[in-house]
Image: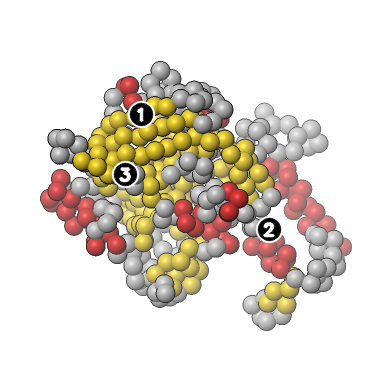
């Protein structure tokens, strides 16, 4: 049972305190920053819709998003680039003629900035959170060379089909600091999958940032009845090039280590796509590979404004498992593919977010900037 103030200040209490402060400021005719209402103390003014200048910090308050910028260069990853940064590994041919795809993944302890000025001591795959979005083709032989440069035992547990020896649990591919393990299995079934660390305590290892997408594209030759659809999902084909594909992982961070999240996001950085909307060409369809890895909350969700999408749960079918929806729910490790189009929309900013309002306000909200064509 939760204790009430003043004995404990959780994230809800913190938000409530902020709202009380804002209400008190409004009643006294002063802004929440202590400046008289309608007057900026630092001269940083921005135009309002009616043309009158309003302080930029008040715009930020009105939008209910974080204030300031995260240093992407220091993090070593950029959430906009991460949308399309597929890790394809090295491809070679085995003696029996089959294609072998080899990935190299290392663990690194790394402090990352998850919201402006908020650092989080992460455990990362390849220095980023989420880890690399691994992408293969159905039927390939896969080899993942896994090296642990971190300070704790870790593994890669793949959601896929493989032998017990390759499962990434204690005794089967879980390795200590300084050790190496090679996971080997075939890329199947096609779909939108994920991997995560399976060391104990599980919740802490996942929550520290140890997860990533594992996408297996369908082999059109294996799906002759729907070869066109399969080709559209196969990276590198002309049919696929029409699509604007994006990798999105819904995650959250417990920065106070009390078993509750203080920040929520799509691709780690709170409100990143609200501040830098995602450019979308209106005449090309959109496909999102979406996974939920949020720890400490039972579900997460994705809601698209002003539009509807088709959904392929786990991505293991070539026909939608849900048609014409504007909201889907995912429990932890659930994932799927969203397909939609803005072809009939006017250009503009279209919001997407978790439809748990608390998650939205704590970081999981973004915008698509729909344009005629990206130059
Ligand atoms: Cu781990």
Residue 97 coordinates in the image, percent (x, y): 15, 39
> Viewer-nearest of labels 3 and 2?
3
Q: Is 213 or 262 nearer to us in this picture?
A: 213
Callout 3: helix, strand or loop? strand
Q: Is residue 165 above or below residue 129?
A: above
Q: Which label was assigned to residue 90?
A: 3
Q: Is residue 347 visible?
A: yes
Q: Are marks 3 and 2 in contact (CB under 8 Å)?
A: no
Q: Which of marks 1 and 2 is nearer the N terminus?
A: 2
Position of 139 with respect to 67 (left or right) is left
Alpha carbons under labels 1 and 2: distance apart? 43 Å
Horizontal side, residue 242 vs residue 59: left or right: left
Name the secondary structure under disc 2: loop
Mark toward the start of the polypeptide (3 vs 2): 2
Gap between marks 1 and 3 measured at Cα: 15 Å
Disc 3 to disc 2, how far (Cα)? 41 Å
Which of 365 and 87 lies nearest the eye of the viewer?
87
Identify which residue is drawn at 49% across, 26% down: 178
Q: Which quarter of the rendered picture does the C terminus lie within?
A: bottom left
- Density class for disc 1 (Cα within 10 Å; few <14, some 14-19, many ≥20) is some
In the displayed structure image, the side of residue 269 where residue 370 appears, left or right: left
The residue identified by callout 2 is 67
Q: How does the figure colour the protein chain or chains?
A: secondary structure
- Relative image position of residue 95 (x, y in whole percent): 16, 35
Identify which residue, 355 or 212, lies in the foreground: 212
User: Residue beneath label 1, please?
Assistant: 182
């Amino acid at each position: 049972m939760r204790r009430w103030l003043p004995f404990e200040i959780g994230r809800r209490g913190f938000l409530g305190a902020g709202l009380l402060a804002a209400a008190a400021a409004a009643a006294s005719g002063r802004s929440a920053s202590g400046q008289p209402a309608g007057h900026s103390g630092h001269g940083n003014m921005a135009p309002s819709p009616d043309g009158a200048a309003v302080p930029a910090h008040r715009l930020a308050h009105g939008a209910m998003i974080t204030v300031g910028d995260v240093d992407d260069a220091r993090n070593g990853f950029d959430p906009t680039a991460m949308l399309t940064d597929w890790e394809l590994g090295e491809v070679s041919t085995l003696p029996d003629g089959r294609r072998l795809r080899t990935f190299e993944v290392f663990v690194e302890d790394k402090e990352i900035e998850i919201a402006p000025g908020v650092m989080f001591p992460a455990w990362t795959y390849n220095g980023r959170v989420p880890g690399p979005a691994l992408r293969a083709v159905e039927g390939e032989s896969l080899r993942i060379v896994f090296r642990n440069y971190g300070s704790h035992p870790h593994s890669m547990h793949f959601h896929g089909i493989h032998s017990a020896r390759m499962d990434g649990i204690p005794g089967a591919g879980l390795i200590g600091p300084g050790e190496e393990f090679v996971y080997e299995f075939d890329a199947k079934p096609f779909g939108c999958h994920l991997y995560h660390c399976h060391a104990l305590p599980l919740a802490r290892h996942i929550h520290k940032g140890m997860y990533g997408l594992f996408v297996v594209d369908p082999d059109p030759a294996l799906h002759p009845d729907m070869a066109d659809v399969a080709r559209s999902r196969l990276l590198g084909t002309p049919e696929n090039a029409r699509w604007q594909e994006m990798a999105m992982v819904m995650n959250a961070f417990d920065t106070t280590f009390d078993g509750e999240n203080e920040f929520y996001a799509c691709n780690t950085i709170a409100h990143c796509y609200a501040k830098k909307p995602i450019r979308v060409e209106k005449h090309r369809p959109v496909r999102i590979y979406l996974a939920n890895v949020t720890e400490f909350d039972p579900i997460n969700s994705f809601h698209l404004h002003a539009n509807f999408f088709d959904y392929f749960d786990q991505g293991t079918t070539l026909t939608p498992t849900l048609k014409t929806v504007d909201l889907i729910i995912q429990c932890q490790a659930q994932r799927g593919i969203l397909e939609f189009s803005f072809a009939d929309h006017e250009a503009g900013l279209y919001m997407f977010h978790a439809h748990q309002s608390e998650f939205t306000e704590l970081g999981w909200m973004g915008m698509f900037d729909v344009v005629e064509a990206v130059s």
